[in-house]
Image (tube, coloured by chain):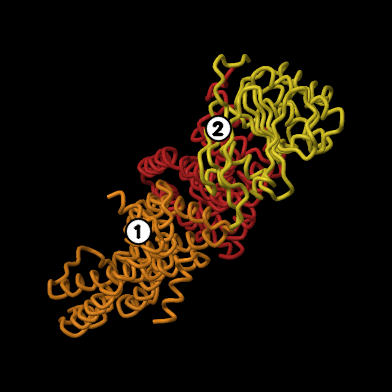
Amino acid sequence: MWSFFHKLGSPPWLYSIAGTILRWLLPITLVVLVAGAVWGLLYTPPDFRQGNSYRIMYIHVPTAVVALAGYYVMAIAGAISLIWRMKMADVAMRAAAPIGAMLTFLALVTGAIWGKPTWGTWWEWDARITSMLVLFFLYLGVMVLYDAYDNKEAAGRACAVLSLVGTVNIPIIYKSVDWWYSLHQPASIKFTGESTIDSSMLYPLLLMIVAFYALYTCCLLMNMRTELLRREARTGWVRRLIVEEGKG
Amino acid sequence: MNTLPTVAFMRRLLRRQLLLALRSPVDVANPLIFFGMVIVLFPIGLGPDPVILARFAPGILWIVALLSSLLTSDALFRSDFDDGSLEQLLLSPQPLYLSVLSYVLAHWLITGLLLALMAPLFAIMLGLAVQAIAPLVASLALGTAVLSLVGCIGASLTVSLRRGGMLIALLVLPLYVPVLIFGSAAVQAAVDGFSVLPYLAILAAMLSLGIALAPFAIAAGLRIGIDA
Amino acid sequence: MTATPVATPLLTATDVTIERGGRGLVSGLSLQVMPGEIWQVEGVNGSGKTSLLRVLSGLSRYGYDGQVERAVPLLYLGHRSAVKPLLSPLENLRLHPGGEGDHTDSDIERALAAVGLAGFEDNLAGTLSAGQQRRINLARLYLSPCPLWILDEPFTAIDREGVLALEQRFAQHAQAGGAIVCTSHQPLNVQASVSRLSLDRERAA
C-alpha cells in the first residue's frame, strides 16, 4: 500500500503508467463512443413531441453530467494535494480544470442548440442551463486564479482552496437556481415536470454517459502527462525519454 | 507574562479595523456613494416609468448592494498584507479562525450594515412598496454578512496578487448567486404580501454555514498568500 | 523571565534546504538556538537571509525541506513593520495584530520612551519619519514576553544612538535567557557572545 503511494508521487512512474492505461482505454473509449452515438442517433425512435431534435440529448446530457463530476474530481485532487502535499494530485487538479471548463462549454452550446427547436430561442433561462453557466464561471475562476499567481506551487494551493469552496457551494447553487426557476417559471411553458424517458432512449443515453466518463479519463490522463512533462522539463528522466522517443 | 485572552484579542482586532475605517471616512463612504450612483443609472437606463422601476426594485437594490459589498472586499486584507500586519497576525498565538472572523465582522459592520441602513432611501426613490422596506433591510443585513464571508475568501486568495480587483469578482460572483436569489425573493415576497420569514431563515442558514466553514478557507488563503 | 533550568533549545532546525526559483539558497542547514544565544545570519543580498528567517519563524510552510521546531513563542520583526499610518504609536501597539501579550497603556508608554518616542505617543504614525515608524515596531522588543526573537534587519533606518540602545537591549534579553536570530549588514556590538552563520559559505560548501 505504502509503496503504491510512494510510486504515485514519482513523476516518471505516473507518466509511464498513464501511458499504459491510455493505450488500452483510448481504443475502448472510441468504440463505446461510436457505438453509443450510432445507437442513439440511428436506432432509437423519434420523440413524440420533439421529433428528432431531442437526439442532441445524447451529447448534451453526458457532457453536463461529466462536467459537474469533473468539478468534484478537480476539488478532490486539490484536497489531496493540500492535505498530503502530493504533487501528482496538484498535477491532476491542474489538468482537470480546462477539460471541465470545455465540457461545461459544450453542455451550454448543445443546450442552446437544443433550445432553438424546443423553446424557439437559443437561450432560455432554464434552471439547468443557468446552473451550468454558473459552473462554467466557477471553472473559469479556478483557471484564471491559477494563471494569476507567479509562484505555481502557491497557485495550486490557492486553486485547491477555491475549488473546495466551490464544492460546498455547488449543491447550494443548484438547489437555489432550481427553486428560483420554479418561482419564476411562466405556467405556459412548464415542461420540466416529471418527464419519463423510455428505456429504448435511456440505454443508449447511459452508454453515452459511460463513454463520456471514459473520454474524460483519457483527456485527464493525456493532460496530466503534458503537465508532467512541462513541470519536469529540466529533469533527467524527461531528457532520457526524449532521447528514447527520438530513437524509436 | 500575561497572555491575552482570545476574546479580548478579537475585540482588539475589531476596534483596530473600525478605528482605521473611522480615520479614513471617505473609504467608508465610497461604497455607499457607489450604491447611490448605480441606483441612479437604472431609471436613466430603463426609463423613468414608476411601474417598471417598482417592479424591478427588489432585484436592482439587491444587485447593487451586492456589487458594493464586492468592491470593498478586495481592500480588506490588502493594506495589512502590504505593511506586514498580516505576517504578525499569522504568527500570532491566537486562533486564526477567530481572528479572521473579527475581520469579517468589521467588514460587515462597515459595508453591509451601512448599506442595509441606507437602502430604504433608495428603495423609496425606486418606488418599492412600503411594506417591503423592512424586509429589504432585514434581508440585506443578513445577506451582506454572507457576502462578506464569501468576499473575504476571494480577498484572501488574491491578497498577494497585484491585479486583485477584477479577479476577485470572477472568483466570488458565482458564489453570490444563492444569496442574491433568496435575498431578492424575500423582498419580492414582501411586495406580493407573503411572509418573508422563510427567506430570512434560509439566509440565516447560509450565514451559519458560512460562519462555520468560510474562516477555514480564508485562513488557508491568507497562509498561501503570505507564502507566495 | 528566567532561564530554564535545563537548557533546551528554543529553536531547532534540522537539515533545512531552501530553494527559490530553482536556485538553491540554503542546503542542509542544521541549527540549535539555545537560551542566551545571539545568532547573526550574514550573507550578501539575495543569499536567502530573509527566506531562511521566514522558514525559521514558520511564515513559510512550503518551498523547503527539513524540520524546524520552535519550542517557545516567538517574536518576528520583518522588513515590513506592521505600523498603520492612521493609528498613533500608542494605538498601533495597543491594537497590534500580533496579540502575544496583554499590555497596559503605561507598559506601552514605557516601551515607546525606551525607543525614543516619548512625546509622540498620540501623533498619528503617518506624520512621523520613517525611522520613527520603524521604532514603533522596535518598541515591541521592550513589550513582548516571547523568549525567542527573529529579527530581519532590525537596524534599518535607525540612527547610531538607536542602534546602541538596541544592542544593549539584545544583551539584556540574552542574559535573561532569551535568544535572538537576526540578520544585519553591520557587525553587532553586543556585550554577549554572538554566533555567526554565513549563508555565503553555506552555499559555497
Q: Which residue is mark 2?
A: C12
Q: CA distance from mark 1 to mark 2?
A: 39 Å
Q: Residues within 10 Å of mark 2 (few under 14, many from 20)?
A: some
Q: Is residue A132 left or right of residue C56?
A: left
Q: Residue furthest front?
A: C205
Q: Residue furthest right?
A: C160
Q: Quadrant of residue A96?
A: bottom left
Q: Secondary structure at mark 2?
A: strand
Residue in view at x 26 percent, y 65 percent? A192
Residue in view at x 54 percent, y 23 percent? C8
x then y, percent, for residue A153: 52, 55
x then y, percent, for residue B42: 58, 60
The answer, for residue A18, to whether it is visible in the render is yes
Q: Residues within 10 Å of mark 1 (few under 14, many from 20)?
A: some
Q: A214 or C30, which is in the foreground? A: C30
Q: Quadrant of the N terminus of chain B?
A: top right
Q: Quadrant of residue A67?
A: bottom left
Q: Which residue is mark 1?
A: A73
Q: Is residue C121 left or right of residue C57?
A: right
The relative height of residue B53 versus residue C117 in the rendered view (above or below) is: below
Q: A50 or A236, which is in the foreground? A: A236
Rendered colour, chain A: orange
x then y, percent, for residue A79: 39, 50
Callouts 1 and 2 in the same chain: no
Q: Which chain is yellow?
A: C
Q: Is residue B73 left or right of residue C199?
A: left
The answer, for residue B135, to whether it is visible in the render is no
Rendered colour, chain B: red
Q: C121 or A83, which is in the foreground? A: A83
